[in-house]
Image (cartoon, rainbow, N blue to C red):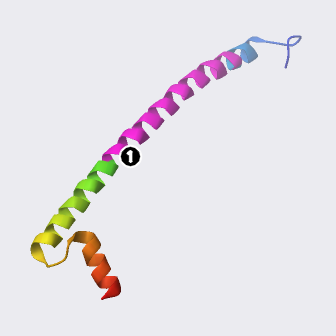
Amino acid sequence: MGLLFSDDAEDQAATIMQNMSVGMTWQFRYMRLRWMVISILAFFAGGVIVSLIDYFIVTSSENNGVVGLLIDRWFG
C-alpha cells in the first residue's frame, strides 16, 4: 500500500515477486533452449526421413527421387 502503511505481508509479497521473476527468467531460458534443441533435432530427423524416402523411390522405380516423382504426377 505504500511506504506509509507497509507491513510484513507486503514486504514478503514484494520479496516473493522479485525472486519469482528470477525463477521465471531461468524457466524461460530453459524453455527456449529446449525448443531450440527439439527444433534442430526435428530438422535433422526430417532430412534423414526425406533422404530415406528419396533413396527408396530411386531404387524401386524409374523416377529421379521425390522431385521427379512429384513432377511426373503433376505434369504426367
Q: Which residues are magenta?
A: 14-41
The residue located at (28%, 82%) in the rendering is 72
In this rendering, is residue 23 above or below 38?
Answer: above
**Magenta span contains residue 18:** yes
Nearer-the-camera pick, 59 or 1: 59
The residue located at (52%, 33%) in the rendering is 28
Residue at the extreme bottom: 76
Residue at the extreme right: 4
In this rendering, is residue 46 above or below 29?
Answer: below
Q: Amino acid at mark 1?
A: Ser
In this rendering, is residue 28 above or below 20?
Answer: below
Residue 3 location, quadrant:
top right
The residue to which callout 1 is attached is: 39
Q: Position of residue 73 (x, y in %)?
A: 30, 84
Residue at the extreme left: 59
The residue located at (31%, 45%) in the rendering is 41
Q: Quarter of the image containing the N terminus? A: top right
**Magenta span contains residue 43:** no
> Is residue 38 shown left or right of residue 49?
right
The residue located at (18%, 61%) in the rendering is 52
Residue 23 location, quadrant:
top right
